[in-house]
Amino acid sequence: MNEKRVKRISSEINKIVSNLVYTDLKNPHIDPLYTGITGVEVTNDLSFAYIYISVIGDDVKKQETLKGFEESKGYIRKEISRNVDLRHTPSLIFKLDESTERGMHIEKIIDDLNSEGNGNE
C-alpha cells in the first residue's frame, strides 16, 4: 500500500482516538488528565493499528488505563469506522509508551548534574 496513505490514515486515527479520550470515553479506568495518545502505526495492509498510550502514574495506574482501553476497544473502533472511509476498520492493539517518562527521567538527571556542577546543592 502507498506509504503516504498509510501515514495519513495513522494520523487520522491518532486525531480521532485523542479526541475520544478527552471528550467521549466514559471509562473510569481512563483519566484524560494523565493519559495521552503518543502515536499510531497502521500496518501496510491496514489490518492492524498499534495505538501507543502514555500514562503518567505508577504501574498500577498504567495497567488500569490499558485495561480501560481494552474495555472501550469496540466503541473506539466504531468511531474510527464512522470517521475514516475504509473498507475494513483495522483491529486495535494498545501499547504503553514509556518514552515520555524516560525523557522526564533523563531531564531530571541532567538538571541534577547541572545544579551539582554549579555548586547549588
Image (tube, rainbow, N blue to C red):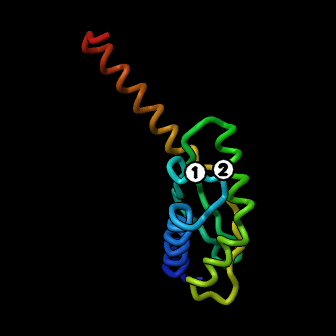
Residue flagged by tag 1: what amino acid is it? Asp
Q: What mark, if any, has residue 39 been given in the picture?
A: none
Residue 11 percent across, percent down from the top left: 49, 71
- Quadrant of the rendered structure where residue 76 is? bottom right
Question: Which callout, 1 or 2, points at the residue further toward the start of the chain?
Answer: 1
Question: Is residue 3 depicted above or below 66 in this figure?
Answer: below
Q: Residues within 10 Å of mark 1 (few under 14, many from 20)?
A: some
> Regarding mark 2 in the picture, which secondary structure is present there?
helix
Question: Is residue 87 depicted above or below 116 in this figure?
Answer: below
Horizontal arrangement in the rendering, residue 39 relative to residue 106 (left or right): right
Asked whether the residues under the numbered discs 1 and 2 touch, taking CB atoms below 8 Å apart as contact, a structural biologist would say yes
- Closest to the observer: 10 or 32? 32
Question: Which residue is under mark 2?
Answer: 65
Q: What mark, if any, has residue 31 been given in the picture?
A: 1
Q: Residues within 10 Å of mark 2 (few under 14, many from 20)?
A: many
Horizontal arrangement in the rendering, residue 83 relative to residue 114 (left or right): right
Q: CA distance from mark 1 to mark 2?
A: 8 Å
On-image quarter of the C terminus: top left
On-image quarter of the N terminus: bottom right
Question: Is residue 50 depicted above or below 9 in this figure?
Answer: above
Residue flagged by tag 2: what amino acid is it? Thr
* Residue at left offset 53%, top offset 44%: 99
- Closest to the observer: 19 or 15? 19
Frontmost of labels 1 and 2 is 1
* Residue at left offset 67%, top offset 90%: 87
* Residue at left offset 42%, top offset 25%: 109
Residue 7 percent across, percent down from the top left: 51, 74
- Quadrant of the rendered structure where residue 114 is? top left
> Regarding mark 1 in the picture, which secondary structure is present there?
loop
